[in-house]
């Protein structure tokens, strides 16, 4: 289902689960308006990576849509498949797989122009490192945080800006919710 699709970053996308996501589940339910928004953003040509997190534990999933249903492939980037309940926060962030997919997309000259529209110039912070890009190609990488152990921090500090997780680190356990989150669900 994901093979014929291209990666698309969804800057600022923030929502939460609408129903349980159990181990082995391949369909993810979001609040109806957010689900429709995500389906429209992805269309039939794209997939993205989303991070589900709660109290420092997180799981990275790959998401695409077909006929208005959100399908997930999981887990990615050394995270573990977990049980998630309604209200669990979900955000787009630069997972390592997303950075890798963006780099591979940029290196495919003459490939699908629709996919190549997603090329990027700038820096991406994914919690563990900062990667600098020019025209979609990674030009440098610098470690900024210590690695996550077993997909959980013992005492996490999560920094959120404009609906995206911009950093996760050890420290006092605090989570600041983005104002862009649907307060009726994430509240």
Image (cartoon, rainbow, N blue to C red):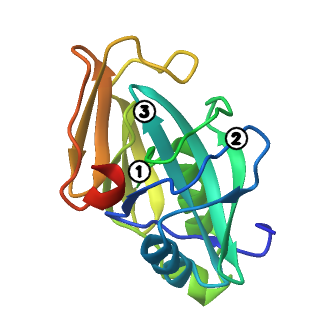
Say what secondary structure mark 3 lies in: strand
Q: Marks 3 and 1, how far apart in space? A: 15 Å
Q: Which mark is residue 82?
A: none
Q: Which mark is residue 22?
A: 2
Q: Please tell me which of labels 3 and 1 falls first in the chain.
A: 3
Q: Position of residue 74 (x, y in %)?
A: 70, 45
- Look at mark 3 in the image and give the residue it sits on: 54
Q: Please tell me which of labels 1 and 2 falls first in the chain.
A: 2
Q: Disc 1 vs disc 2: Cβ atoms closer than 8 Å?
A: no
- Look at mark 1 in the image and give the residue it sits on: 93
Q: Position of residue 56 (x, y in %)?
A: 40, 25
Most foreground residue, 61 or 119: 61
Is 99 above or below relative to 10?
A: above
Most foreground residue, 37 or 184: 184
Most foreground residue, 35 or 74: 35
Is 102 above or below relative to 66?
A: above
Foreground: disc 1 or disc 2: 2
Q: Disc 3 vs disc 1: Cβ atoms closer than 8 Å?
A: no
Is 91 above or below relative to 34?
A: above
Say what secondary structure mark 1 lies in: loop
């Amino acid at each position: 289902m994901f093979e014929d699709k291209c990666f698309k970053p969804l800057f600022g996308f923030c929502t939460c689960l609408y129903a349980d996501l159990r181990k082995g589940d391949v369909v993810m339910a979001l609040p109806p308006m957010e689900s429709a928004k995500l389906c429209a953003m992805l269309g039939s040509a794209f997939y993205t990576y989303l991070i589900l997190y709660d109290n420092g534990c997180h799981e990275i999933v790959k998401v695409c849509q077909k006929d208005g249903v959100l399908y997930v492939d999981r887990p990615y980037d050394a995270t573990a498949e977990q049980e998630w309940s309604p209200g669990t926060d979900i955000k787009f962030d630069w997972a390592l797989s997303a950075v890798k997919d963006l780099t591979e997309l940029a290196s495919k000259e003459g490939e699908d122009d629709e996919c190549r529209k997603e090329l990027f110039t700038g820096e991406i912070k994914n919690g563990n490192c900062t990667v600098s890009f020019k025209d979609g190609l990674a030009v440098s990488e610098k470690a900024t945080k210590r690695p996550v152990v077993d997909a959980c921090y013992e005492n996490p500090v999560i920094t959120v800006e404009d609906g995206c997780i911009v950093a996760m680190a050890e420290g006092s356990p605090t989570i600041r919710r983005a104002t862009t989150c649907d307060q009726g669900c994430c509240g």
